[in-house]
Amino acid sequence: MKELILEKIDQAVKILNEKEIDMWLTFVRETGNMKDPMMDMIVGTHATWQSAFIITKSGETHAIIGSLEFENMKSTATYKNIHPYLKSVKEKLLEVIGKINPNKIAVNYSRNSILADGLTHGMYLELMDHFKNTPYSDKLVSSEEIIATLRGRKSPKELSLMKEAIKETLKIFEQVTEFIRPGVSEKQIADFVLELVNKKGYGLAWDKEQCPAVFSGPGTAGAHAKPTERKVQPGHVINMDFGLNINGYCSDLQRTWYVLRPGENKAPFEVQKGFDVIKESIQLAAAELKPGKLGWEIDLVARDNILKHGYEEYPHGLGHQLGRFAHDGGALLGPRWERYGNLPYLPIEEGQVFTLEPRLTIEGYGIATIEEEVVVTKNGCEFLSEPQKEIYLIRS
Amino acid sequence: MKELILEKIDQAVKILNEKEIDMWLTFVRETGNMKDPMMDMIVGTHATWQSAFIITKSGETHAIIGSLEFENMKSTATYKNIHPYLKSVKEKLLEVIGKINPNKIAVNYSRNSILADGLTHGMYLELMDHFKNTPYSDKLVSSEEIIATLRGRKSPKELSLMKEAIKETLKIFEQVTEFIRPGVSEKQIADFVLELVNKKGYGLAWDKEQCPAVFSGPGTAGAHAKPTERKVQPGHVINMDFGLNINGYCSDLQRTWYVLRPGENKAPFEVQKGFDVIKESIQLAAAELKPGKLGWEIDLVARDNILKHGYEEYPHGLGHQLGRFAHDGGALLGPRWERYGNLPYLPIEEGQVFTLEPRLTIEGYGIATIEEEVVVTKNGCEFLSEPQKEIYLIRS
């Protein structure tokens, strides 16, 4: 835990140098009630009273915290300089910033990126009050670029935690294949998965009401909805979207099954074709993914392949980054649609972990969708999940 | 769950009428990553894209949400009017507010109260952008008063959930009494408790690193610190601070033990005296607690009693409210110290649940502290926890 944080703080110092920003301030309070999304990555403990966590371009780290939390911060051991205060954070904060004398102060707020927007408006007003009669309020910039870069570049330790989460997730998919049979409901499949997760003491990558998400047959919601009482039937294509959180890092994967009808021993032509187009779209996109490319270019490869085969395009992006959250980082493998803002235009970097998750509807059967995870390497990308090669067949 | 939320929304409408505020807006996004502290109480589900939850003085409820979450919001069934949007929240938001034509808009930000400060600064800037060329930005007020009142007034259903959490917490204290013996460490006691909690599938009322907090003997940190390898010894006074979260509601209780030395069959005079002074201070404070009193008046009763017996005063407030969080609500039973702001001056209301938790140091033995929970009634208060009457004795 501590090593992981020190590794990310080191990375942050490099990024501050790249972006020529002298200091990065994360300003928080009562993180037990509402936690700035960066706390777990760059602090590693909670803060009750107004607290400032400062990382500088020259590699200094300062934690300015309530005095009752001094012992706790010391034993967390992630910040070199700890400044406890009794009455108000203001004096120590101004003293530390005064010594740094920064050109710019990157602060934890952002209009575009929730992961960089941990500063509440009440706390912003407090900060402006502390900065009254100083030059600091004019030096504020959003920390969104620092955070997008820092969260994107996975360290070797982060990658190994993510691989662990993927491995365990794939094991659970295997057990699901054994469990599915005609007559069980989507909800029963989800409950089976949650029981396995609880037994192993793992966390979920997102809200348990929709993790796993399970959709059986034609005419389902297909995404962003809870498992229902709908029962698995022969002739259904089933898909499941599921991820674990193990030691603070998330997986996010999807798999597709087909339930054989009496007399069938393989999936019918149209189901097989749908599955194959998804599988191929993922491989085509992965072949193009490398540092310097833009996210929309990768999305377009998969999207075009699906359109070319006569299916409707998927109503979302091809893939997102993941890490401590299931939706993490900045750059997105998404289309150039207004709702994605500038994210599809950010250049892809080495060390980023993306999902690849195209989908298409197989009329009368259900939804085919596979979601794999890849890490961007120096010249391309590598699969972190063993890709699904064949549609999983369920016998009646 | 749904009934509990509808009950709180009804209460909110009454409070808007009392305070003569036409509408209350809770503006959020990506609550899966960082959740406004009011979401569980007045919404009951998550929101991914910019979303507005509006409650009006006339009893209307409006949820303006991303269209992919329409089904989810409908099945949550806590808001009567659901307005899904595709591209931007702005149009629907202005349309709904236009019809309400409010005198004031209470919004989820606050300098003083973290529970009312769920709006991030980035989202505040977004809101100001949506409100450009409208009169609405001039009508904004903090929702802190509404929230303090709403969180304070416990409904019968909330009270019964809190009683359940208290009952289970007291059961665990009993098991701890069986477990403590000379030679076990603070950390072993804490681990024993956490195992019981896991086995029952309960949540903790605060950060598990300090829940339970266990302090054995003289010279410990005494509060806000993790259990250590320090071992229980004859002659130690032990205290433990612990709370559960069951079905979303928290308990927070403390108990005191004494470890008999060879030849002792009761606590020595000075230990007994310290314990009795704490016990008495709680009863004296409870006797004064009733609607209309101010928090500092109640704190002073316990504080004076402790000083009168020759002990140092405790370095914190006598008690705080609890509910969905261990530190909840507004009004505080605290001294008139600057760091508590206006909270000790807010009048006490019927239905509020407070802790009573004075402490004192017994030189050479440890810290005596009991924490009970009471609910404010029409003319006084009632104990929700069966008060600790005798110091628990551990035989060597």
Image (cartoon, coloured by chain):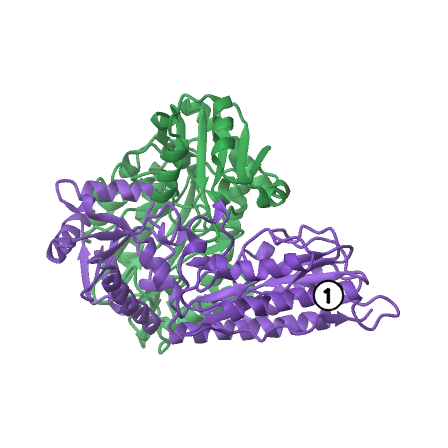
Chain colours: A green, B purple
Q: Nearer the viewer, residue B34 or B220?
A: B220
Observer-nearest of B202 and A322 = B202
Q: Position of residue B287 (x, y in %)?
A: 53, 71
* Residue A84 vertical position relative to residue B182 in the rendered view, above or below: above
Q: Residue at x 54, y 46 (%)?
A: A45
Along the line of sight, which residue is nearer the eye, A246 or B8? Answer: B8
At 43% from the left and 53% from the top, the residue drawn is: B343
Left or right of A290, for residue B97:
left
The quadrant of the rendering that contains the N terminus of chain A is top right
The residue pinned by badge 1 equals B273
Crowding around mark 1 (Cα neighbors within 10 Å: few <14, some 14 to 19, many 20+) is: some
The quarter of the picture where residue B47 lies is bottom left
Residue B3 lies left or right of residue B158; in this view the side is: left
Relative to B258, is A25 on the left or the right?
A: left
Q: Position of residue B125 (x, y in %)?
A: 26, 40
Dividing the picture into quadrants, the one containing residue B366 is bottom right
Check disc 1 and give the amino acid type.
Lys
Q: In what quadrant of the picture does the C terminus of chain A appear?
A: bottom left
Residue shown at 52%/32% (left/top)?
A: A92
Where is residue B60, by image quadrant? bottom left
Image position of B133 with respect to B69: above or below: above
Q: Position of residue A348 (x, y in %)?
A: 36, 34
